[in-house]
Image (cartoon, rainbow, N blue to C red):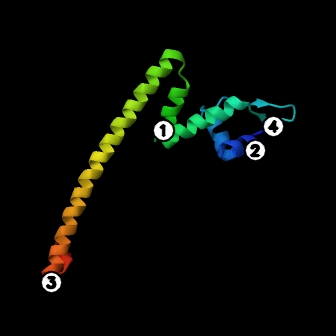
Amino acid sequence: MKIGELAERSGIAASAIRYYEQAGLMPKAERGANGYREYGDAALERLNLILLGQDLGFTLDAIRDVLALEGEALHGGLMQHLDVRLRDIDQMMAALATQRASLLEAKAKVQATWERGECPHSL
């Protein structure tokens, strides 16, 4: 299939497919006699994996690292990347919980200030 069909079937812009190829996430496409890129079904599967990785919040570098692995190394590498991503999410959630608590405290102070008839600018 040509890049336009691959783009349509994957829901990814042709320019993004070219970028993924240039960035080493996709193997270089075969070229037809007319010079156009030709892709097989494996390219669509690869794009779906890239999209899944991005949806899960992985960087393109992390996706590239996992896609380069095979066999047992793939399992171990994938599990390691998943564990790192889970730790990152846990840290983000803790930071957000702290920010939320701070915002609730600030909101209560502003409300109390208003109820006393004072201007919240004096906080």
Q: Position of residue 17 (x, y in %)?
A: 66, 40
Kindly state the secondary structure of the residue where label 4 is placed. Answer: loop
User: Distance of mark 3 from mark 1, alpha carbons?
Assistant: 50 Å
What residue type is disc 4 on? Tyr
Which residue is located at x 83 percent, y 35 percent? 35
Q: Which residue is mark 4?
A: 36
Question: Could you tell me if the residues under marks 3 and 4 are in contact, i.e. CB atoms within 8 Å?
Answer: no
Residue 59 circle label: 1
For the residue carrying disc 4, how many other residues have a C-alpha within 10 Å: few (<14), some (14-19), or many (20+)? few
Q: Position of residue 36 (x, y in %)?
A: 81, 37
Q: Which residue is mark 2?
A: 4
Count all numbered tags in the image, as a single digit: 4
Q: Which residue is mark 3?
A: 117
Above or below, comparing residue 112 to residue 69 in the picture: below
Q: Earlier in the sequence, mark 3 or mark 1?
A: 1
What residue type is disc 1 on? Thr
Kindly state the secondary structure of the residue where label 2 is placed. Answer: helix
Select label 3 or label 4 by which is in front: 3
